[in-house]
Amino acid sequence: MLSAKQFVRHFSISQSLQRMKIAVIGQSVFGADVYKLLQKDGHEIVGVFTVPDVNGKPDPLAVAAQSDGIPVFKYKRWQIKKQPIPEVLAEYQKLGAELNVLPFCSQFIPMDVINFPKERSIIYHPSILPLHRGASAINWTLMQGDKVGGFSVFWADDGLDTGPILLQKKTYVAPNDTVDTIYNRFLYPEGVKAMGEAVRLIDTGMAPKIVQNEDGATYDAMMKKSNAVINWDQSAEAIHNWIRGCDKVPGAWATINGEQVTLYGSKMWNRMEPRGRSVEIQGASRPAIVHKNGMVVFGKDGKMVNISQVQMASGKMINANKFGRDDGGESKIELTSEEKTMIADLKKVWAGILNVDVEITTDFFKSGAGSMDVVRLVEEVKEKCNGVSLENDDVYMNTVFEDFCTCVVKRGRGIEDKEPFEFEAVKMRKNNMDLTIPYQLFIENEFMDSSDGKMFKTINPANEEVICEVSRGTPDDVNRAVEAAKEAFFEGPWGKMNARDRGKLMYRLADLMEEHKEELATLESIDSGAVYTLALKTHVGMSIDTFRYFAGWCDKIQGKTIPINHSTPNRNLTYTKREPIGVCGIVVPWNYPLMMLAWKMAACLAAGNVVLLKPAQVTPLTALKFAELSVKAGFPPGVINILPGPGSSIGQAMSEHPDIRKIGFTGSTPIGKTIMESCAKVNVKKVGLELGGKSPLIIFSDCDIDKAVRMACSAVFFNKGENCIAAGRLFVEDSIHDEFIERVVAEVKKMKVGDPLNRSTDHGPQNHRAHLEKLVEFCDIGVKEGATLVYGGKQADMPGLFMTPTVFTDVEDDTMMAIEESFGPIMIVSRFMDGDIDGVIARANASEYGLASGVFTKDINKAMTVADGIKAGTVFVNTYNKTDVASPFGGFKQSGFGKDLGEEALNEYLQTKAVTVEYNM
């Protein structure tokens, strides 16, 4: 005797095991997957009805059924003149199906078949009925710009997709969805599941029959090549929807240069109008523009659509950016024996998919292949060709067997179909080497003229000759670069790249900088006046070290887990993530053009940001050469953008741009204040400022005077005094003052002033004429204020912008010379009383600047007292200018805030996100 509980359970099991006799009528991989699901659910498939073989190749539904021993029927047609073929009808009825399932069917099925089973027939349709009835429903969903798409499973009747609804499923339509993407993302996988669900509802007697509402019903034409022509007299969005709705079949087309051209890969172009070649399109209000990233076409509203690929009338697919270009044919690749074997294997793969004899001229799609065959081909190539990885587009772009083989061989060799990196350059011979100098703006991995075509001259300070003319950027160019950077960060590969891969790119760039270090140092020397040997070791050498240092940080940027109070009885966990800021702007000075670029940009890139950099207008050349190397290193377009030009336009435009979220600036304090104000007004962007300095150097009488003299000269005259941390004022203990001055002058007299490319030169020219004149004026004011000019104080008597290394003493605390930064080779010395440690610290701190400082003494207690007491970002003890890539660098007070170098520099380009999770134990 069964209990009630046992009886109910027994009844439920018996109900669930009741399965139906089903005839599956249709085709395609979709049909095969529905068939497999019905099999898995335990239904009895009494027969499968599909289309005849094409070129001897059975439909995937037939293959699946035959492998299971299910009867398969391949009728060319079911009816003639709307009357069922008797023998076909009889053969079908003999199977005794209780339900017809039509997952995808291109044939007309007579009503005698539709109505024969006890449960009749259900059909899958890829739209939300009653919208888009007809065979091209997916196309019209996209072409009409629907925001919601989906599919219906309905009961078949004698109308065109008019039967009662059994179930419907909806999904969003993404702005750039194509037939393939929405089908593969939703219509296919969810459609298969829904067909199984529909049969289960019928099986359990719970399937509804909801009559379709005719309000808003649409009957849409079947899309064919003949009616897929683009109407240009509509908005850009409507044109985009039409093109994507026809992508890849049947393909929206237009007449361009008298030829029928099919357009693929459509996206709205919400950026500035690109620069490129104009191409006339029949019927369009404006010519298309073929540019680096494709082909832009215009709607009647003036908005733009970008096309990534086009197909010529011959069937040849090309990237749209190559349209109209005569490439002169591609040279034939010499094959290795292994590659010849691989091509033989490829021929077998194609033959297996197409069921035809494959020749070098065989076209994959013209031989009957479809989109699912593309997937199969890509997977079989990976399996049979030593793991060669292809994208689906590689098949679409190489549809002829010979072209496809070339593509596979190239991929196997690691060759990608990249555009050659070509640019205009100034060529010259300097320093016993040939120089190639880019001179245009660098935006999105392309050198280009400025928007207004204006140029400026960059001058060699050693002889005041023009090196070359350089493109002068504009605010319009800043906008274009920001758009490119945003694309790189939000849409491009950079934003999706693994941190370790980001580091590899930075290491590769550092390696290229090292390969080109002599060329970079020569450019730095002729453009900024840096002594070549110093440029090689410091300007360029430390730049390379900086990129390598931060490359190592890329995969070590981590958050924390934080214990917080739990929401009893649940538990909580808080963790932090360090995320990049996004688009950053960097403005660097003229004293170390490449090194200042590296100090800021390396940390910025390591953190995952993208960047616009404005080099100083007087020293743009190494930044542009660096840009060239960044492309060769493999940095994606838009990650690095270099914009030479005046700070009043480029720098100001960057500070005020709402999409730039961080500005890093090295330069004068007044300009830093202006940048900070602009950043605060526009979007409160994050700011890092490394500004002016008046770094004190204190020399006690108990120092190693030989070393102190040598290091003091270096502290003042290093890089011609054009050094942000130069010792702007020396305090020398009274008892050694005279000896110190005497020794310094002796050292200064030994310094060789002259051609910076000469390996024996110690002291090169000042960076530019205005600066030299300011230094001479600075010395004149010092003399007038009562300081003692011990040596120099004037322009050197030689051609070029050379300043004689200068020494002043007896400088009073309240004079201009004691307060303002010279930024040149001028040693400013003041005495302090023997033993007055507190007094000299107070005098050293009586400045609005606090960038660096130094002390020379053998007494560790004095040294530590000074180090603790000085208000500066860096303190050197018994050394000077000893900066290192691992040590943070930055100032206090009006010398700015934020850090370059070391781990702390990463904080300038990261933002911290806290995530709190609640969970149950």
Image (tube, rainbow, N blue to C red):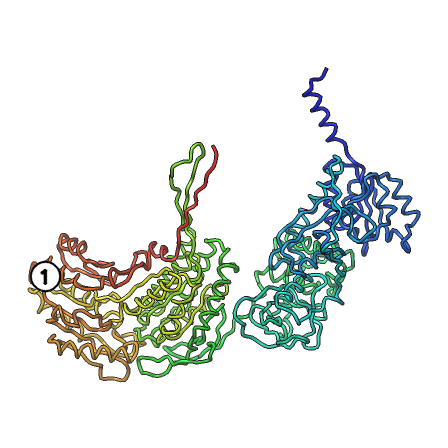
Q: Quadrant of residue 815?
A: bottom left
Query: Which residue occupies 91% across, 50% down?
Result: 85
For label 1, the residue is 701
Residue 742 visible in the snapshot: no
**Residue 94 in the image: x percent, y percent?**
89, 40
**Residue 363 against residue 213 in the figure, above or below:** below
**Residue 223 in the image: x percent, y percent?**
74, 62
Q: Quadrant of residue 215?
A: bottom right
- Label 1: few (<14), some (14–19) or many (≥20) C-alpha neighbours in 10 Å: some
**Residue 56 against residue 641 in the figure, above or below:** above
Local secondary structure at mark 1: loop
User: In the rendered view of the protein, which quadrant contains the N terminus?
Assistant: top right
Q: Amino acid at mark 1?
A: Ser
Query: Which residue occupies 10% across, 71% down?
Result: 810
**Residue 159 against residue 730 in the figure, above or below:** above
**Residue 835 in the image: x percent, y percent?**
7, 58
Tally of marks: 1
Query: Which residue occupies 74% across, 57% down?
Result: 218
Nearest the eye: 713 or 450? 450
Nearest the eye: 574 or 312? 574
Nearest the eye: 724 or 390? 724
**Residue 175 in the image: x percent, y percent?**
60, 59
Residue 808 visible in the snapshot: yes
Q: Quadrant of residue 820?
A: bottom left
Nearest the eye: 466 or 294? 294
Q: Is residue 821 left or right of residue 675?
A: left
Q: Residue furthest top?
A: 1
Query: Which residue occupies 39% across, 45% down?
Result: 560
Q: Is residue 164 left or right of residue 686?
A: right
